[in-house]
Image: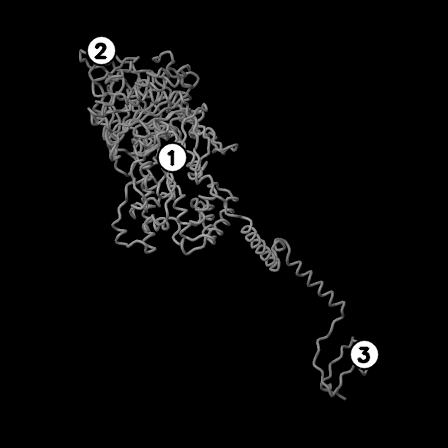
Amino acid sequence: MSDQSPPPGWTPRDPDAPARTPAQQPSAQQPQKPQKPRKPSGERQSRRAADRAERKRKRTGWRRLVPTWRTVLAAVLLCAVLVIGALVAGYLLVHIPPANSAATAQSNLYLYADGSQLARDGEVNRVNVPLSQIPRTVQEAVLAAEDRDFYSERAVDPKAMIRAAWNTATGKGTQSGSTITQQYVKNYYLGQEQTIKRKVKEFFIAIKLGREKSKDYILEGYLNTSYFGRNAYGIQAAAQAYYGKDVGKLTTAEGAYLATLLNSPSAFDVVAHPQSRDRALARWNYVLDGMVKKQWLPAAERAATKFPEPGKVRPAAGLSGQRGYLVEAVKDYIVENKILDEKTLAEGGYRITTTIDKRRENAFVDAVDEKMVGRLDPETRKADRVVRAGGVSIDPATGKVVAMYGGIDYTKQYVNNATRHDYQVASTFKPFVFAAAVENDSRTQDGRLITPNTVYDGDNKRRVVGTRTPYAPENEGQVSYGNITVTTATDLSVNAVFAQMAVDVGTAKVKKTAIDLGIPENTPNLVASPAMALGTMQASVLDMAQAYATLADHGRHTPYTLVEKITKGSDSIPLPDRTPKQAVSREAADTTTSMLVSVVDNGTGTAALAAGHPAAGKTGTGELDRSAWFAAYTPDLVTVVSMMGQDPDTGALESLYGALGEARIGGGGYPARIWAQYTKTALEGSDPLDFDLELQPGAAPSPPPFVPSSPEPTPDESGPQSPPPPTRPSRPSRPTPSDGNQDQGGRNQGQDTEGGTTEGDTSEGRGNEGATGGTTTGTTGAATSGTTAGTTAGALGGVTGGRLRSRPPSEYLE
């Protein structure tokens, strides 16, 4: 008999399950829904524990460090509560304070290195005016420059603050991100210090001020408290300082320029800092374009707007003479090195001890007055009107600027000639080319190591080999020298040799060496090209003194400083780190020095011998004779002097032709004489120091070649001869520099001189310095024979133990 099918609704029984009682059996008349078998409670607990263990196993390692979404949500809510609480507490606790001391700014006290007073600045120039007296276009120019949405935005802009912080952190430049309201709070109620505490106060005060005061009230206060440079606080003082008129008479273009100054007051002053003119114009255009964008200025009127040249600076009488130049140079140093920002410094109250040595500063002024200024006669000689001078003296061991000459008088010639960047440095750049050659073990095109004794072709207009750019520079006077050594080429400043050397070394390496020595990387016209060897870059006198100080200190670069100490009350302001570093090897610096010693002993810088101290230096004459340089140093003092030509009315650079009654002005003339007198006085009381030099291998000076007395030279049978060097006029072994028109053993200043050389132009292939070769000397007119390639090196003295010692101090004139 077969098994019958189970009745409907019957659930198969698990054979292992216990038998059910009748009461537990499902009713046949009431079908039951299938039910999931229930598991014993112990099994369920085991399963749950297993699930928990499984989840725990999945969050091992780094996963256990990642918070769950519940944890994240809780943290966000907690932070939100804390932030809201902090904002409420800050708003309730921070009150609008009275006006700060910056609203009536104090003066800063500047001291010489010995603690005596140099100058005091900071007399407040401020005249408040109501907003109704400020032309609408001037107001709109300020808004276009600083805060274009001022009237529609809140008092603070968190997005802008975050964006500015991000740009600053990522190296896109320091940006404030502050609204005009915040800037007004900073100007009038707080201060310029960059601290978190000040920013927090600024934030809450700005919110309160925005709720309690109108936009017009805030804009008026901002325009009356902002600093515009030239010691001018407020728009009315700025209008007078820059354009000599009341604010109500300002044009749109003038208002846009004053608005430009708010970004960087002194740097954008195109009169005080002509090198920043391009940046200032770019900012001025930005302001006008912003006005057009906001439909505050018609595009046609914008297109017809021309840049309004500001007037001359009228400095305070208390900054006359050299004081003003020194104060401005110190201010620039403080701001550029981010010791204090310009607005914070303008608040005043600082006691600033400079590195300026009062005795040496006076000696510099006396030297310029006696050797140059006292001989100017602008009434008789028109060319004398354009003559200016600048100078800087640095202690190479410490980097301290001990003296600076900025011009005849700060109240008459405002631009500091020691720090300006618009004149070519000419042949004073050539030592950097040679230093780069030694530093990089460079070789000539045919594989010879470059040393002072390496022979180069010094012919005029010789095509530079090894560069795709056609370049054939002229020598001064278009003189061809034939084959000459590097030392002789340095003595005579032969352009053809150094242009070729720059290519042999690599112009990029030459540029790097110049920067390593101390030339700022952003120096105008510091371009890696063969022409750079002729000194086409426009470094300041201060920059050149810094670079030569590195050579003087055996290649060790110590950043210069003008500041010894800054205090405000009992607080000392931290100064930047100036740890020295080896910029170039000692042998590169010292071998360069050995050749510059020869320039003073035998070349174009012999006027420096009057200092009575061993010296190394280089002369230079800029393009179209617009400048004449002498950069030189003793072992313990570096000084650079430059004469410059500038029209006193237009500010245009002018040639020095005819100045001081001379046909031409060269670096070996007046600049070298100023250098000699200043150095002699500055080092008075100290013993002359010898140069202690370690030369590169192969740089040992060779003895002077034998010059036969007979007309026909006797051939040397020992080997082939080097090509003869150019003929140079002989000179006395102990030249006595003259204060008159003749510079014996130095530069020709319009009359025949013994051993005279001339200097020329440097631009578009023009030579910037050189020598004319032999001249006739004496009353007999007999031609004298010139020195030869080894003479200059031999004049340096012997070599002992690998070190070169210059001429003994006893042999120098006292």
Q: Which residue is mark 3?
A: 19
Quadrant of residue 676 in the image? top left
Q: Which residue is mark 1?
A: 520
Question: In the image, residue 396 lies at what x, y percent?
Answer: 42, 25
Q: Please tell me which residue lies in front, 787 or 65.
A: 65
Q: Earlier in the sequence, mark 1 or mark 3?
A: 3
The amino acid type found where label 3 is placed reads Ala
Q: Earlier in the sequence, mark 2 or mark 1?
A: 1
> Which residue is situated farthest in the left direction here?
780
Marks 3 and 2, Cα distance to the nearest angstrom?
Answer: 146 Å
CB atoms of marks 3 and 2 within 8 Å:
no
The amino acid type found where label 1 is placed reads Pro
Q: Which label was assigned to residue 710?
A: 2
**How packed is label 2: few (under 14 Cα within 10 Å), some, or many (20 or more)?**
few
**How packed is label 3: few (under 14 Cα within 10 Å), some, or many (20 or more)?**
few
Marks 1 and 3, Cα distance to the nearest angstrom?
Answer: 101 Å
Question: In the image, residue 739 lies at what x, y percent?
Answer: 27, 16
Between circles 3 and 2, the one closer to the viewer is 3
Tell me the SS state at disc 1: loop
Quadrant of residue 520 in the image? top left
